[in-house]
Image: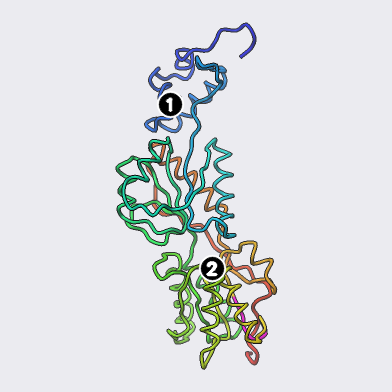
Amino acid sequence: MPAGSQRATLAMVAEAAGVSLPTVSKVLNGRGDVAAATRQRVQDVLKELGYVPQSGRRTVGPARVVDLVFDDLVSPYSLEVLRGVTEAGAETGVDVVVGRLPESDDDDWARRLRLAGREGLIVVTSALTRAQVEGFDRAGLPLVVIDPLNLPRVEVTSVGATNWNGGVSATEHLLRLGHRRIAYAGGPVQASCSQARQHGYRAALENAGVTVDPRLILHGAFGYPDGLEMGGRLLDLPEPPTAVFAGSDATALGVMEAARRRGLRVPEDLSVVGFDDTMLAELATPALTTVRQPLQDMGRVALRTLMRLAAGETLDSHHVELATNLVVRDSTTNLQGAP
C-alpha cells in the first residue's frame, strides 16, 4: 500500500471483490465453504489493496497446508511423486507436509489433521482401512490416493496410470522379440496397480496364443530385495524364463542382479522390462527398458484434485488415469534363435 494512503479494511475488500464481509472473513480464516472462484477473487483483492490485519502482519489469508503420506519415503518412485506434488503446491500457494502412514485405525489421525488446519490428505501406494476413510469423512477432510494398494470404497478419489495398457505394451514388446517364456515379477497381490499390470501381461500372452504358466507369476514388495528373491526363484526353475516383466524399476534391478549372480547376461541370456521409468532405469547397467508412468504429473494432478475437493467442487470422475508408454533401452533383445 503506498505511503500515506488509507489502510485497507475488510469492508473495502468486500466491496472491491463484490462479496459480503462474512465471505471475506471465511477466506481469511481458511474456511472450506467458499467457492474456488470466489476465494481466488477475494485473495486477489486482499493482495491488490495490501490488506494488513491489526497484528501488522501482511497476508492474503492463512497458509493452506495438506499432508502427503508415503509407505516408502526414500524410493525413486516416491521422490518423483513428491516433486510433482510440491511443484503444484508452490504454483497454487499450498504448503505440503510429508509423513508416513500411521498405524492407528481410528479417528485420531483425521481429527489431528483437522485440528492442525490441514485442508486434506494425499496417500501414496499405501493400504487404507475402511475405518480410516470413514474417519476422514466424519472430519470433513478430502482424500486423494495415488497408486492405491487397495480402495476401501469405490468413491475414494484416486490418481494413477494406465497400468493395464502398460502391462500389455511391456509383454507385447517381449513377444515381438521372440520370447515365449515370459515371467511377471509383480508387486503385492492386493495392490490394484500390480493386479492391472498382471492382467495386461496375461491379456498380451493370451492374444498371442501363449499359454500362461502360473509358475512364472510371482508377487512381492515393489523393491530391490523382493526383485532379487523373485528373480532367483524364477531363474532356478527347471525351465526358467527367457524374459521377465517386473512390476517396478527397483524390482527389475533385483531380477538383473539375480541373473548376474547365476552367471547370466542381460539382455543376451535374459531380457528384463521394468515399470515406472525412474532415475534407476537410466542408471542401470545395461540401461533398463521400462514402462514410463508420469509420476510427477500424477503428483501434480493429485494436489490440484485435492484442492478442488477442499473448495467443495464436484469432480467429473473419482478416478484419473494418465497415459503410460514403453521406453526401449538396452535390457531387452531378440531371443537367440528367434526369427
Residue interval drawn in magenta: 268-272
Task: Quickly name the residue at label 2.
Answer: 223
Callout 2–callout 1 Cβ contact below 8 Å: no
Relative height, residue 248 to residue 272 (above, below): above
Mark 2–mark 1 distance (CA, rounded to whole Å): 43 Å
Residue type, label 1: Asn
Task: Quickly name the residue at label 1.
Answer: 29
Residue 50 x %, y %: 57, 18
Question: Which disc number belongs to residue 72?
Answer: none
Camera-side mark, 2 or 1: 2
> Which color scheme does this rendered protein use?
rainbow
Residue type, label 2: Gly
- The rendered magenta stretch, by its main secondary structure, is classed as loop
Residue 289 x %, y %: 63, 72
Residue 44 x %, y %: 53, 25
| Residue at 31% in and 49% down | 106
Q: Nearer the viewer, residue 12 or 316?
A: 12
